[in-house]
Amino acid sequence: MIRHLLKLAWHRKRANVLLLIEIAASFLVVFAVGAFVTYFGGNWRRPLGYDWRDVWAITITDERSGSGPEEGEAALAGRLVDELRQVPGVLAAAGVDSPPYVGWTNISNYDVKDRTIVFMSSGATVGADRVLGLKLLAGRWFSREDDATPWQAVVIDREMANDMFGTVQCVGKSIPRDKGGQEGGTLEQRVVGVIEDYRKDGELAPPDNFVFQYVSPEARSGPSRTYCLVVRVPPGAPVALEEAVVGRLRALAPQWSFDVNTLDQLRTQRFWSICTPILILGIVAGFLLLMVTLGLIGVLWQNVARRTRELGLRRAMGATRLGICRQILGELVLVTAMALLVGTVLVVQLPFFDAFDGVPRPTIVSGVLLAIVTILAIALAAGLYPSWLTTRIHPAEALHHD
């Protein structure tokens, strides 16, 4: 049966090649959309590692330079944190270089034996765990006792602990210096705590290595060029509280400006910045699939019209309506399967060109299976009506058809 269908497909190779190319292109688009949706959907179901509700992120900008606080001004930033904690209505406050959902981050790397571990990092003060609702798995968060230690205290997330030490039970262990650090140029960094996976870039981001580095108000230099304060407030905090917070901060540091955003706002912006390209790709895929469906119906309809005498002769020789219908659908499934094979071969080549870098292999497999099922379902749905038309042709009428 398959051999016979291959011969029939070969005899109409010109029309089938165009159809094959169209189906293969649709397969690639559906695969891309399916892989991204599966990937981001899997990330969405993972624990976030912090609580973004009722938290404000206050970005500090020096109005004199248009950038963050200058070096040597970390003590003033520390005073701002203490001042915020005195504002009625503020539940907790802390300093964090790179709060959740913001567009900037620090990326560094450690050399561990024969491999390099890349991680994101952020300076943080005492109390940041309370503001962000971080969940400790081992050890503790920063305290003022870390001011007197000859090493720098760090808190790492689960992903970083497993990647570097192979376990979350790594409190008290030292981690290597930055690859770019000069000999003796940086303090020893020692783990004082391990938290749950901290996905700074939000629900759609995968778990990644993250390191919080302790920042003391008495530090000689600011933790970064852009400094942020994070504040936890009661649910439904009024606008008056924001005005009181900004007014208190400006009274203490009139040379700085303070931009207040809720993490809810930053979360929404981050979400749509990632989802908008996927949504556009999905719309393109939808139009392409609609075109493929209409094209399949048109091609099959024309195929049935041109083969009226052939199909009528088969009916006259005893072929059943169901047999004719199976033949038409079988030819369509064969051409579709060949197109899917071509598309799958192209997808297998993507890792060699660093396409979909970072996407887990199960996600790619899921995208391929989803695309195969979708294209086959569309092909069968498009072929049902034209194949049904063949069963309505009377043998005598078909034999007299020009």
Image (cartoon, rainbow, N blue to C red):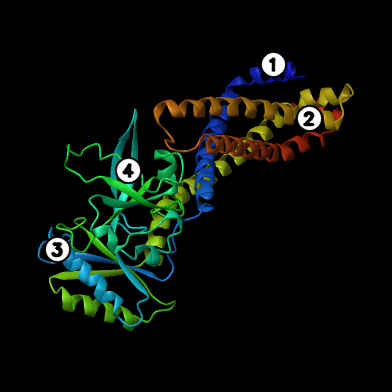
CA gap, disc 4 and disc 2: 69 Å
Place of residue 92 in the rendered image (x, y in percent of width and height, measured from the top left): 35, 72
Q: Which of pointers 4 and 2 lies earlier in the amino acid sequence?
A: 4
On the picture, is 170 further left or further right than 24? left
Q: Which residue is mark 4?
A: 174
Q: Amino acid at mark 3?
A: Glu
Q: Which of pointers 3 and 4 lies earlier in the amino acid sequence?
A: 3
Q: Amino acid at mark 1?
A: Lys
Q: Which of pointers 1 and 2 lies earlier in the amino acid sequence?
A: 1
CA gap, disc 2 and disc 3: 79 Å
- Using the image, determine if residue 253 lies above or below residue 42: below
Residue 103, by quadrant, is bottom left
Tags 3 and 1 touching, CB below 8 Å: no
Label number found at residue 326: 2
Q: Quadrant of the N terminus?
A: top right
Q: Amino acid at mark 2?
A: Arg
Q: Which of pointers 3 and 1 lies earlier in the amino acid sequence?
A: 1
Q: Which residue is mark 3?
A: 73
Residue furthest left as drawn:
64
CA gap, disc 3 and disc 1: 80 Å
Q: Which of pointers 2 and 3 lies earlier in the amino acid sequence?
A: 3
Label 4, residues with CA under 10 Å away: few <14, some 14-19, many ≥20: some
Nearer mark to the viewer, of 4 and 2: 4
Label 2, residues with CA under 10 Å away: few <14, some 14-19, many ≥20: some
